[in-house]
Image: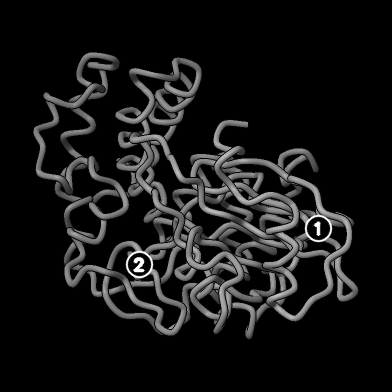
Amino acid sequence: MAGLDTLPDAPAIARIVAACGLEPHDLRVLGQGVTAIAWRVETDEGAVVVRVELPERPLSTANAPARFDAQAAAVLRLRALDERVPRHIATDRSIEADPLAGRWHWSVDSYASGTSFTEAGSPPEVARDLGGLLAALHALPVEGFGMLEDRSEVLRGGESGMTDGLLSRWATLWPFDGSPLIAHPVARLAPQHLEALARMRDPLLRYLAVPVAAVCHGDLHGEHILVEDGRLAHVIDFGDAYVAHPSWDLASFAHHNGWALTEALIEGYEPKRILREVRLAEAQQLAVALALQKVVKFHTRDERRLARMLTFLEETLPLALATVR
C-alpha cells in the first residue's frame, strides 16, 4: 500500500494502544482508505481499531485531511443514546503524552464487528434499524452548518450559513453553488433531463430557508452499515459528518441503496405516516442535487459509477417532480 513506509510501524501502533491504557497483543493492518490507514489490535478488553492519517492524500478528495476529533464529537454523543456505534477511546489530541510526539494524527476506537449491509443481502429490517439510529443522530443538539469542526469537545458545523455549509461538504452542488445548469456536465451527458432539472431549481433552493439542521452521517453506503443475525450491529465512519437538513442523509442512503430500502429506512426513522411521506419527498428532491454532484465527481474518472448515477437520476427525477407544488 502506498505510503506505508512513511507511517508508524507495528511497535508504534502498539505504543498508541498502550498510551490509551490497554495492553496490545496481535496487530494487523485492516486496510487503507482515502485519508487514513487502519490497524486492528487485540487487547485484554477486546479488539480496537487504530487509524493513522495518511501523509499524502489525493488532491481530488473533498474530505481530506482525516477528521478524527470531529468523528469523536459525533460518536461520543450518539453512543450515549445508541450503542450501535463504536466506542471512542482516544485521539492524539485527547491524551497528555502522545507516544508519536505529534508526528501523525491518529484515533483509537473499539472494533465494530459485522458483515457489510450489501454482503448481508441488504435486509429491509436493517434499513429500519438504521432509520431509528439516524433519528437519534439527527436529534443531537448542534450549532452551525457544514463540515464539523475538528474538535471533540463541541458538536458544531464550521460555517455560519446554510449555503456555505453545503459547499464545505461539496464544492460543486447545483443549484446551491450558483452555477448555471447549462454549464453542468449533465447538459452534455443527459440533455433530455434539462427541462425537468430546471423545474427543480426553485424547490431545491427553498431548503435554504428551512430552519432545520442536524448532524448527518454523510456517507451511508453498505460498507459503513454492519449486520449481525439479520439486524443492525454497527454504523461506522463518521469522517464525512456535517450539519445540514437531516433529509440529506436519507438522500445519501437512497443513492447508495435504492428507493425501496429508503422507504424501509424511513419507516424506522419516523413513526407517523404523514411525516414519513414528507421525509420521503424531501429525500427524493435532495437526491436530485446529490446525483448531480456525483455526476460532476465521476464524469471524468469513473464511467461505471457515472452510468449508475445517471440511471439513479433518471429514476429519481420523476419521483421528485411529483412532490413539487
Residue name at image x 58 percent, y 47 percent = 7
Question: On the rendered structure, is 94 left or right of 315?
Answer: right
Q: Relative to 119, is 162 above or below?
A: below
- Residue identified by numbered label 1: 113
Residue name at image x 33 percent, y 40 percent = 288
Q: Nearer the viewer, residue 319 or 16?
A: 16
User: Where residue 166 sits in the image (x, y, percent)?
Assistant: 26, 56
Q: Nearer the viewer, residue 138 or 160?
A: 160
Q: Relative to 157, is 308 above or below?
A: above
Q: Nearer the viewer, residue 273 or 288?
A: 288
The secondary element bearing badge 1 is classed as loop
Residue name at image x 57 percent, y 55 percent = 52
Residue 56: image tag = none
Amino acid found under the numbered disc labelled 1: Ser
Tag 1 near tag 2, CB within 8 Å: no
Nearer the observer: mark 1 or 2; the answer is: 1
Q: Please indicate, yes or no, whether residue 174 appears anywhere in the rendered image.
A: yes
Question: On the rendered structure, is 295 left or right of 112?
Answer: left
User: Where residue 6 sits in the image (x, y, percent)?
Assistant: 55, 42
Residue 243: image tag = 2
Question: On the rendered structure, is 239 left or right of 18?
Answer: left
User: Where residue 156 sits in the image (x, y, percent)?
Assistant: 34, 76
Residue name at image x 34 percent, y 28 percent = 295
